[in-house]
Amino acid sequence: MIALHALAKVAGCLRPLSTAIQQVGLDVLKAVNDVIDVSGLLQKYRNDADCFTTLFQSAVVTANLLDITVNKPRTVGRSVYRDNAGEKDQSVEDYYRLNLFLPLVDSVCSHLQDRFGPVQQKLFGLSALVPAHLGSYNDVVAGASLYEYLITVHELPTEFELWTEQWTRAGEAERKKVNTAVLALECCLQRFVKLPNVSVLLKILATLPVTTAQAERVFSKVERTASAARSSMLEERLESLVLIQTHRDRTLSIDDIINRFAKSSERRFIL
């Protein structure tokens, strides 16, 4: 019961983040900021003893309604099959905080760090090219080092200086308007003086996927479409059906098709 209350507390933080990072066309900068906010809140839960106290009291109230006595399992000096952190004479609340709540929060934070770990942080260093988050060249070069085969490395410092100078003269108000990688790329492509290396890095940042949710959705549609009854369909037809399912907002409605046929002058097939 205490575990369910703890999971509900942690899931309350993760559900908005999980929904947000599965959006189509999500900007990587916004995703990183959301992950940082959730990680900071989980660390706050971990370091704040009053947080688990409130959670534990809520679990006790639920247990009392169900006539369940809240106690800790029998502890021994050396436990092999059960977590047994803390002293022998610790309270029930301290036992579950040390052996249940803190490991749960640490595990979630560890998974978030693995998903957005050192390699991802290098890639997200390219966000220093976005005018609203303009940073130093050291922030950019860490991510650019992963794509040395796509850019001219010795030209990048000069282009970065030109890019920074342009937005420094533009003023803070103009920089705040360009707060995504897509907007920054559009501004870079519209410049009279071309910056090919900066534009390549901005393209990478703009197309960098936050999650694989969108690709997995397409695979799920393929599995539902290519059923046993449709196993003999051609590849072209399969691709067309998957595209129709994926882009339902762009497909014509039945009424539009009927109206288009009604306005046509032809009433029969031409043999």
Image (cartoon, helix red, strand yellow):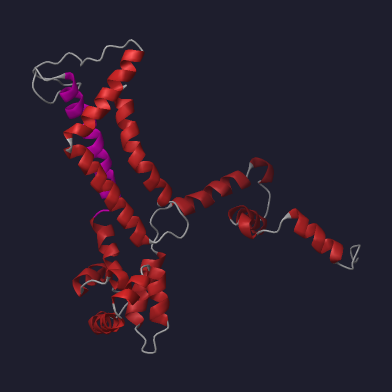
Taking the image as shown, residue 11 lies to the left or right of residue 245, namely left
**Residue at (31% x, 14% y) in the render:** 64
Question: Residue 216: horizontal and vertical position, in percent?
Answer: 48, 50
**Residue at (25% x, 29% y) in the render:** 54
Q: Can you say which quadrant of the picture contains the C terminus?
A: bottom right
216 above or below 90? below
Question: Residue 224: horizontal and vertical position, in percent?
Answer: 60, 44
In this view, the residue farthest toward the top is 67
Question: Residue 232: horizontal and vertical position, in percent?
Answer: 68, 49
162 above or below 237? below
Instruction: Tell me, yes or no, if residue 226 can be seen here.
Output: no
The residue segment tinted magenta is 92-117
Taking the image as shown, residue 1 lies to the left or right of residue 72, namely right
Q: Main secondary structure of the magenta part?
A: helix
Looking at this view, is 159 or 164 the one in front? Answer: 164
Q: Is 95 inside the magenta-drawn segment?
A: yes
Q: Can you say which quadrant of the picture contains the N terminus?
A: top left
